[in-house]
Amino acid sequence: MSTTAFKKSIAWQKGYILVLEIYKSTDSFPIKERYGLTSQIRRSASSVVFNIAEGLLRNTLKELTRFFIISRGSCGELETQLMLAKDLGYITTEVSDKLIGQTVEIIRILNSSIKTLQAK
């Protein structure tokens, strides 16, 4: 796979859009959360897309599967963090629902990919 072929992955594309939206949505978080929830949410969202890219550039199906599983775990972290941000009043229900919806869509794609890879 070429070094940029991962960009063709639907999971990566959706993950990249999600990271951009997460960064924009967390810009308005309180200053006191800069090194707390703001940082955690941004790292979780970045981890989703970073692990998809890294997995797609690995040499074996086993490694690809492992990185997709890590990415899926980061999606779970992110979903929980977004719920917390909403409950703390840092983001609206509308923003939370949109971002969680995008996260769940990525989880579905990863689940399908993992299942296919594990069957090989």
Image (cartoon, helix red, strand yellow):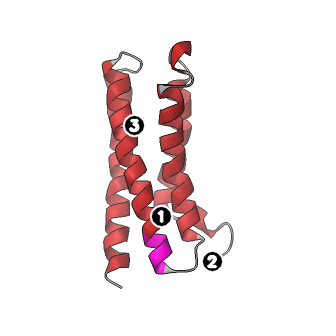
| Closer to us: 11 or 74 | 74
| Closer to us: 87 or 21 | 87
Give the residue pinned by disc 3: 99
Q: Which x, y percent locates residue 95?
A: 39, 27
Dot in front, 1 or 2? 1
Q: Which residues are magenta?
A: 61-65
Q: Residue sitting at 56 percent across and 14 percent down?
A: 31
Give the residue pinned by disc 2: 1
Badge 2: few (under 14), some or many (20 or more) residues near its Cα, within 10 Å? few
Q: Amino acid at mark 3?
A: Leu
Q: Is residue 25 left or right of residue 112?
A: right
Q: Is residue 21 left or right of residue 93?
A: right
| Pointer 3 with pointer 1, Cβ within 8 A | no
Q: Is residue 76 visible?
A: yes
**Judging from the image, what secondary structure is the residue with disc 3 in?**
helix
Position of the N terminus, as image quadrant, is bottom right
Which label belongs to residue 67?
1
